[in-house]
Amino acid sequence: MRVILFTGLVALLAFGVQSLFPWWTLIIPPVLLGLFVYRKGNEAFFSSFLGLLLLWIIHAGLQHATSSGDMAARMASTFGIPIVVLLLATGVVGGLLAGLAGLSGFYLQRTQQKKRRN
């Protein structure tokens, strides 16, 4: 249940951040959630991964559907893959970035906890 909640939270926060700032700012919400919220490493990675995977697939699909689709078709033909695979690959790249960012925030939290104990 926590993973589903955090997945939605990551997607919502990342959407807000990406609407205002450059694309690479998508790592800020997962890192902050990793620092302050997540209790387990796999929870940090998978929640962040799924949140951005879904966000970027939906966003890329909407961009493709609302435009004439020329850019996605050109990119897909350049790589020799179907458009659906291109949209999935886009989501996986964003998901991996966010998953690693969430995991980094979680490990940073753990190192801070270890320093406080010593």
Image: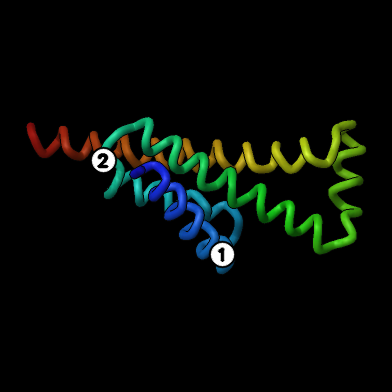
The C terminus lies in quadrant: top left
User: Residue beneath label 2, please?
Assistant: 109
Quarter-wise, where is residue 82 in the image?
A: top right
Q: Name the side, left or right, on which 68 lies relative to 6.
A: right
Question: Residue at left 45%, top 36%?
Answer: 46
Q: Residues within 10 Å of mark 1 (few under 14, many from 20)?
A: few
Mark 1 residue type: Phe
Give the residue furthest to the bottom: 20
Q: Position of residue 32 (x, y in %)?
A: 35, 51
**For residue 71, above or below residue 111:** below
Q: Nearer the viewer, residue 10 or 4?
A: 4
Question: Residue at left 59%, top 47%?
Answer: 54
Alpha carbon separation for disc pair 1 and 2: 25 Å
The N terminus lies in quadrant: top left
Give the residue furthest to the left: 118
Q: Position of residue 63 (x, y in %)?
A: 76, 58
User: Residue beneath label 1, please?
Assistant: 21
Q: Name the side, left or right, on which 79 lies relative to 19.
A: right
Question: Residue at left 34%, top 32%?
Answer: 41
Q: Position of residue 90 (x, y in %)?
A: 69, 42
Q: Secondary structure at mark 2?
A: helix
**For residue 25, above or below residue 116:** below
